[in-house]
Amino acid sequence: MQSRQADETWRILYERQLPRVRQWACREYLDGLELLRLPADRVPSLSYLNDRIEPLTGWKTVRTAVRYTDAVPWYGHFARREFLVTDYMRDMQELDFTPEPDMFHDIFGHLPFFMNPAYAQLQELFAPAFLCADRRERENIKRLAWFSTEFGVKNESGRRTAFGAGLISGADELLSMVEGRTRVCPFRVESVLRYDKAVWSHNRVLFEFPSLEALKRELTQYLDTIGSLRTG
């Protein structure tokens, strides 16, 4: 969807959220944002995005009319290095919070990261494991992705920064994290998987890691185990 109303909503959200992310987002995001050069006054086209992302990491964006894509088709696209961007844009009554991921979340929250090859490699860990996992393991993988790429927290020289796209694109979630209103624990696979869905789906706790490399090491051990069990 490309409309005057969507462009106006994008302009307002971009103007409000940009100063916050410049202050509180992690270095990987800020470097990607500078390279991606998102327009401030309109929703960028997929061709605009793909011309910048694909040469750096091999990923591309694909439009979908589905507002919330189920995990199996989602990771099917990930296996092809395709990131889905929904047609949906929140309305003016949902500027602070939208219950469904919209195109502002998809583009502003996620895509600057895909300018970073190391981050792209992190995302590429999930699909092979998910697509060969059993039902319980798939729920575990979804939870690990939620608390890393969607709502992860990165410690940069003793300072907490937003790593997850949900924190970066959401005003309420980001402010809750930086103001200390959300409990933050060290990221360990066993710690993340200990929480049931009633806790993690409402972000009552977030998980923090010291670096992208440390997060990749933590996830790789678990995800590689799933893949080796299925293919060995």
Image (cartoon, helix red, strand yellow):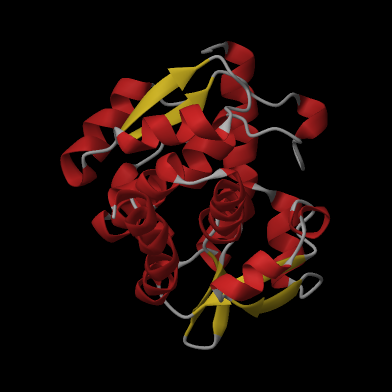
Residue 42 visible here: no
Residue 10 visible here: yes
User: For residue 23, which quarter of the picture?
Assistant: bottom right
Q: Looking at the picture, does residue 83 appear above or below residue 228? A: above
From the viewer's side, name the closer residue of 40 and 58: 58
Q: Report the residue at 55% width, 18% height from top.
A: 87
Which percent across, then down, holds residue 216? 38, 68
Q: Report the residue at 35% width, 42% height from top.
A: 37
Which percent across, then down, holds residue 80? 29, 32
From the viewer's side, name the closer residue of 132 and 103: 132
Q: Looking at the picture, does residue 170 appear above or below residue 206? A: above
Q: Report the residue at 29% width, 22% height from top.
A: 47
Circle count:
0
Classify the position of the C terminus by image quarter. Answer: bottom left
User: For residue 135, which quarter of the picture?
Assistant: top right
The residue at the far bottom in this view is 158
Which percent across, then down, holds residue 59? 28, 37
Which percent across, then down, holds residue 221? 39, 70
The residue at the far left in this view is 55
The residue at the far front in this view is 232
From the viewer's side, name the closer residue of 17 and 158: 158
Q: Report the residue at 64% width, 74% height from top.
A: 191
User: For residue 71, which quarter of the picture?
Assistant: top right
